[in-house]
Structure formats: structure tokens, C-alpha cells
Image (cartoon, grey):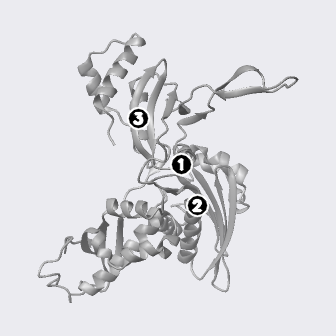
Amino acid sequence: MMLNPLLIFYPIYRFLFQHHVVIPLFTLLICFSCLSSVSHAEKIVGVFESNQMVANYSSAERKKAVRKGLEEVLIRYSGSRDILHEGSVSSILQNPEALLSSFKYFSYGQPEQKNSAQDTNNGQNTQATKSRGRQGIGLNFNGQMIREHLVRARLPIWSPNRPRLVVWWAVDNQKQRTIASEQTDIQLVNSLALHAKRRGIPLVLPKMDKQDLHSVDINDVWTLDYDRLQVVSRRYNPGVLLLARSTHTLSGKWYAQWGLVSDGRLKTGTIEAKSEHALVSQVIDQISENLAKEYSVVVRAEPISDAQMQIVIHNISDLKDYAQVSEYLEKLMLVKYLGLSRVEQGKLIFDLELHGELTQFRKEIGLDHRFSAISTPSYSLGPPAGEGSTETLMIEADPINRIEYRWIGRK
């Protein structure tokens, strides 16, 4: 989605002029092209990619891997395994290769291009029967086609712009209790990273440097001290917070208790598994399912209403603010159209059309801590509602459906 160039530069130049800043237009264009934005929410990459293990290079083996890979992509993109039980999804899983853009075979330690989106020799690979030790296939699916299918079927989509998950995990291995980090438990850390990537969750583990060691101890994590760890985690700019503790029993089983703090609310769960890797997989699956219920949305093919809508961003002081605000907003999943309407003193006013509900859009923009919601102003009209009444009729100050935010991204 691109903003109209005619609406971009003139209002900005006018804005700078009103603030008594004189910059040649040529310089302004160069500065604008060089600006970048930083978001507190992270945009995950590889949403439509999957790596699957294969026994050989045969067409039959590839077809099985493509179906499994598409299932993984659909779960990641929607946020929930429930997507696989939808009738319209079952139909595309019958022919998953129709959604495949490209693929390549690889062996561990030595990536190797073996195929493209289409096989040669009428679909038969000349090395189909050749086998290696551990080998896999990298799959790249057509994201636009998948999105269009889910939109037509009115199925939920979880935006790639997702809340950062900060994880505090304490482990009792029968000998001692430790806080998981790259220094103390690389195997657990690798499992967390693997399964978070599988479900499309931006993962952050504590550095356990001097600052962390001074601020938190094993008892804080083991007792799942939410209040304490929320304060300690501020340095990592968390979108959501996961606290967990796991125990390896003498019988060989693994148990975990977890708590998820999201939007000020706490959800908890317990898990039993036969291995630590399986335990981590189940924890991440449960966390993803919970987050998807909160953040996934049904995207409509057309705007939800013909009513005029605007978003007003306050506290804009320079060109860098404008660039960061507009770039972030126009990339949000629910935004169908974003056009700069006008610039006022310290404010940007955009015309806005959405693919979904306004409440869903508010939740999506709320992932970025640089935007602070402002209540829509109202004012009183005329005398009290009736004789002897103390009530005053309140109406919206502007008939246009308008939402307002304060920009606090400047450091």
C-alpha cells in the first residue's frame, strides 16, 4: 500500500515551514528516502516457509513433505491448529503443491539446490532414488494465494506483526535449579527457539548479564513472581511475558507449570511430557493458541463500512516522526487504505479504511508502545435533557468516525 506522493511531500514541507524550518525540497526528498522506523512489536519473517525432513528425493516423498509443510504454514499464519479442521482448508490440502512457489533440497551441513517449483522430465526427478543421511526440503509457499483463500473463507489470520514474547524459564534437573539461558541450558534454549519459530512467535530470553543477575534470582522465576518479573523485563520491551518452571522427575517424565501475562491478564497451565523437547513444544503450542485467540482477526475482502473514518496522530514534531508513523500504519494487516488528509499544528490526520473491525485495529496498533490511545473528545449541547434533570446531552465533537493517538516514539 502506497501513499499518494502528492499528498506526502507538500503537507510535510508546509509543516516544516509552519515551524520555521527552511529546507530545500530536494534535500527533503533525500532525507525522507533515508528514514527508517523501529517498532516495539516484531514482524516475523518466513511466515510462508517450511523445512521438512525427507527420506529420499522421490516425488511421493516430496508430496508428503509439501502437505505437512502447508499444514505448518497454515497453523502459523492463523495462529491455531483449528484451521486444519475447516472444510475449505481441507480442500486445499488435497492439492498442496498448487500453493507451492518454490522448493529446494538440502542436506545438513551442506545446502544443495536440487529442484525448483517445477520438476523436469514431466515431474520425475532423475535422482529420485538417491538417498543421503539426513536430508530435507525447503518449501516456499505463495503467501498471497493463502491469504486470499482465508479471506474468502472468512477464516482468522494472525498478523505477522506480533507481540514480543519474553521468556523466564526455571529448570530443576534433580541436581540444581537454574534460569534457562545460553550459558546454563543451551539445549532448552534451542528447543524454545525452534518451536517459537515453528509457530511464528518472536522470542526473547534474558541475557542473564550483570543487570539481570542483580535484579532477579532463581526463586523469583521458580515461584512465578509475576509482579517482580514484569518490572525486571522492561529492559526487553515485552509484548507478552511467559514464566515457566519445569521438573525432570526420577521416573524420567517432565512436568511444567507456566503463566502467560498478556494485556495485564494472567493465564496459566500445566503440562506433562516424556521429554524436555516435547515439553517445550507443548508449552509453545499452548501459548500460541492463547495469543491467537487474542490477536488473530477475520479480514474482510471489502471495507466494513462506507462511513468516513480518520486516524489522528498527535505530538508530531518533525519529518522523522511522520515517516515512522506513516510507514508503520500503512503496513498493518487491517489497513485497506491510508491517505494523508492534512497536517495541523503537531498533528497528522489520515483518511482510513479497514478490512476488519475497529476494535481489532485498535488491538493491532496497540502492539506498538509508541502509540498511546487518546479518548475521543465530547462536548455538551444545549440545556439539560429535561426539566429538573441534571443530565446534559453529550455528543461527539466530530461527526466523522475518528480515533486518536499520541506519538511517543521519540527518544
Q: Which residue is mark 3?
A: 326
Question: CA–CA distance between discs 2 and 3?
Answer: 28 Å
Residue depicted at x 34% and y 61%: 143
Q: Which residue is mark 2?
A: 293
Q: Secondary structure at mark 2?
A: helix
Q: Amino acid at mark 3?
A: Ser
Q: Amino acid at mark 1?
A: Glu
Quick one: quadrant of the N terminus? top left
| The image quarter in which residue 338 lies | top left
Q: Which residue is mark 1?
A: 357
Question: CA–CA distance between discs 1 and 3?
Answer: 20 Å
Q: Earlier in the sequence, mark 2 or mark 3?
A: 2
The spot of residue 103 in percent (x, y) is: 25, 70
The spot of residue 253 in percent (x, y) is: 64, 82
Observer able to see residue 56: no
Residue found farthest to the top: 20
The spot of residue 121 in percent (x, y) is: 11, 82
Label 2 Cα crowd, 10 Å radius (few <14 / some 14-19 / many 20+): some
Residue found farthest to the front: 387
Q: Secondary structure at mark 3?
A: helix
Label 1 Cα crowd, 10 Å radius (few <14 / some 14-19 / many 20+): some
Observer able to see residue 365: yes
Which mark is nearer the camera, 1 or 2? 1
Residue depicted at x 32% and y 39%: 2
Q: Earlier in the sequence, mark 1 or mark 2?
A: 2
Label 1–label 2 contact, CB within 8 A: no
7 relative to 262 in the view: left or right? left
Where is 329 relative to 304, above or below?
above
Q: Amino acid at mark 2?
A: Lys
